[in-house]
Image: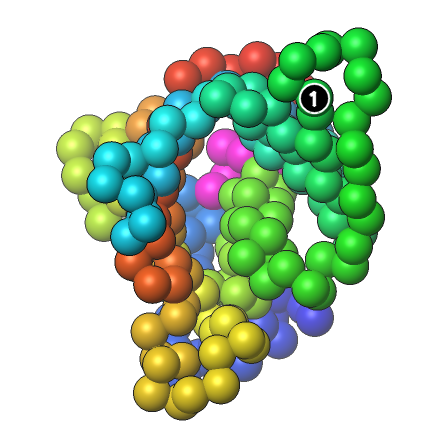
Amino acid sequence: MTFLSLLLFFSNIISAQEITELQQLLSPFSETKHIKLSYEEKRFSAFFKEPQQYHGYIEYISPDTFIKQVDSPEKNKVVIIQDQLTFYAYDSKSSLEPPIKKQVSLDAYPQFKQLKALFSGLFKGTATELIKYYQFKITPITDGQTHLRLESLVKDPFIQDDQEKSHTNQKFDIIIDNKKIIKINMAGLGGERSELLFSKILIKE
């Protein structure tokens, strides 16, 4: 779908000026071929009294590879290449053991499909990629710092009740500071949410 076609398709939702503003915000990432970011994550859940702490890295390789690895408290990894999702689980007692690997279709895990769409859209630096999946709102915070709110257009297919479906959209609050993504807050189903803070750029090409 061309850029003009998308403008016409979404004209009843967002204006061309808003899309241009989003494109300008994303433009510093448009030449990204490979980026790897270390992160610290807090996950909040109704099943735990205290937030769970995780450390690892997120990696994007153009055009269609997304990796999220958790290094602690236990090592595991998710790799998405096109529509193929691969889980890796590592033996915590031995670094010499090969990981247990499981491959599935990305369509079976909509939460990972949305996560890939998010990071692919951000690091491709194209507004048209993001507006396929998200409504958005841009709010300046301070000089050099901007808040980008994204709300998923795709609802969880496993929730059958229409009333419940209205509350299943994923929401992302992204803080961009001086052309760097420094923080992403994610909210999903059932009060589940996480805070993702990027602490260091490990690779950028």
| Residue 62 left/right relative to 193 | right
Residue appearing at x 47%, y 42% in the figure: 26
Residue appearing at x 28%, y 52% in the figure: 46
Q: How is the image coloured?
A: rainbow
Q: Is residue 71 visible?
A: yes
Q: Would you call the spot at circle 1 few (<14 residues within 10 Å), some (14-19), or many (20 or more)?
A: some
What predominant SS class does the magenta segment belong to?
A: helix
Image quarter (top left, top right, bottom left or bottom right) of the N terminus: bottom right
Q: Position of residue 59 (x, y in %)?
A: 63, 29
Query: Seen from this angle, which residue lies furthest bottom?
Result: 162
Q: Per the image, is 28 magenta?
A: yes
Residue appearing at x 33%, y 74% in the figure: 167
Q: Nearer the viewer, residue 40 or 33?
A: 40
Residue appearing at x 72%, y 58% in the figure: 106
Q: Position of residue 158 (x, y in %)?
A: 54, 76
Query: Seen from this angle, which residue lies furthest front?
Result: 93
**Which amino acid type corresponds to the residue marked 1 in the rendered image?**
Asp
Image quarter (top left, top right, bottom left or bottom right) of the C terminus: top right
Give the magenta part as a residue range. 26-30
The answer to whether residue 56 is above or below residue 95 is: below
Q: Nearer the viewer, residue 187 or 190?
A: 190
Q: Position of residue 184 (x, y in %)?
A: 37, 39
The answer to whether residue 25 is above or below residue 55 is: below
Residue tagged 1: 91
Q: Is residue 125 visible?
A: no
Q: Position of residue 197 (x, y in %)?
A: 36, 28
